[in-house]
Amino acid sequence: PYTPLSSPVVSRSESFDIDVTVGGEAVPWESAILRLKWVSYYQLPSERTDAVADTLDLIPLIYKQCLARHRRSRQALAAYAQEPSGMDAAGAATPPHCNSTPATAQGDDAHELAFAADRLFPIFLYIVVHARIPDLLVIRHEMQLSSHSGRADYAVATLDAAVQAILGM
C-alpha cells in the first residue's frame, strides 16, 4: 500500500512549509478539500478531471475572498484607531468606515492581488494531502490515460505534480 497518502495527515501546514494563511489568519480551505474528495466518487476520468479543475478554480477565489475580509478588518481597525473615542465631533457614535483607510494600507497588500502558480501549487498540495483520497495513484493514472485539452490538461498536470511532490516527501 501507498503509505504517504494513506497515513494520518498532520494538521499543521507548517510541517510542509506551506503558507495557507492570509495575514496570519487561517483560510477555510474546507470547500476546496471537499470538492477534491469528489474525485473518488466519480467513475469517468472526465468527471474526475473536472473535479480537480474545479478545485484549482476554487483556490484563488477562496484566497481572494479571505484577503478581502482581512483588508476590511484592517481598514476597520485603522478607522477605529483614528477615532479612539468612537464618537464624531457632535458626540454621536460612529462606526468604522472602510473608506477611511490610510494610503499605506492599500499599497501593503498590492502584491497579494496576483495569484500565480507559485502560490497556487503549494495550496493545492495542502488540499490534496488533507483530502486523503483513497486510491489517488490509481485515479491519477486513469486520468492520465484519457485524452484532455486545455483546462483538463492543466488539472491533470497539476495533480500529477502534487502527487510527485508528496511521493518525494
Image (spheres, rainbow, N blue to C red):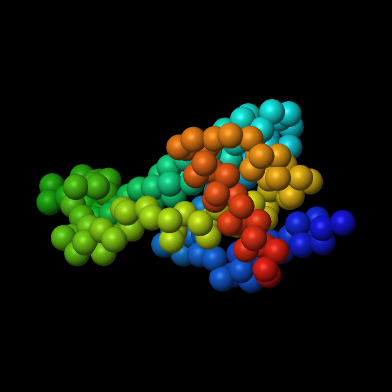
Viewport quadrant of the C terminus: bottom right
Residue 129 placement: quadrant: bottom right
Q: Count the marks: how many?
A: 0
Q: Nearer the viewer, residue 56 or 167?
A: 167
In the visual, does 121 lie left or right of 113? right
Q: Residue 139: give x, y in percent of width and height.
A: 72, 42
Residue 155, quarter of picture: top right
Q: Position of residue 105 (x, y in %)?
A: 24, 61
Residue 119 rendering spot, x and y as whole percentages: 44, 59
Q: Is residue 159 left or right of residue 105?
A: right
- Outermost residue to the right: 1
Look at the image and tell me whether residue 31 can be seen.
no
Looking at the picture, does residue 39 appear above or below residue 15?
above
> Is 41 left or right of 161, judged from the image as shown?
right
Q: Is residue 167 above or below residue 62?
A: below
Q: Quarter of the image for the N terminus: give it.
A: bottom right
Confirm whether residue 137 shows in the render.
yes
Picture residue at 26% right of the left edge, 64% below the top? 108
* Rendered location of residue 69, percent (x, y): 38, 48
In the figure, 91 relative to 54: above or below?
Answer: below
- Out of 150 and 103, give the one closest to the viewer: 150
Q: Residue at x 61, y 68 (%)?
A: 16
Q: Which residue is located at x 18 percent, y 60 percent?
A: 102
Report the residue at 60% width, 56% height from top: 162
Q: Residue furthest left?
A: 89
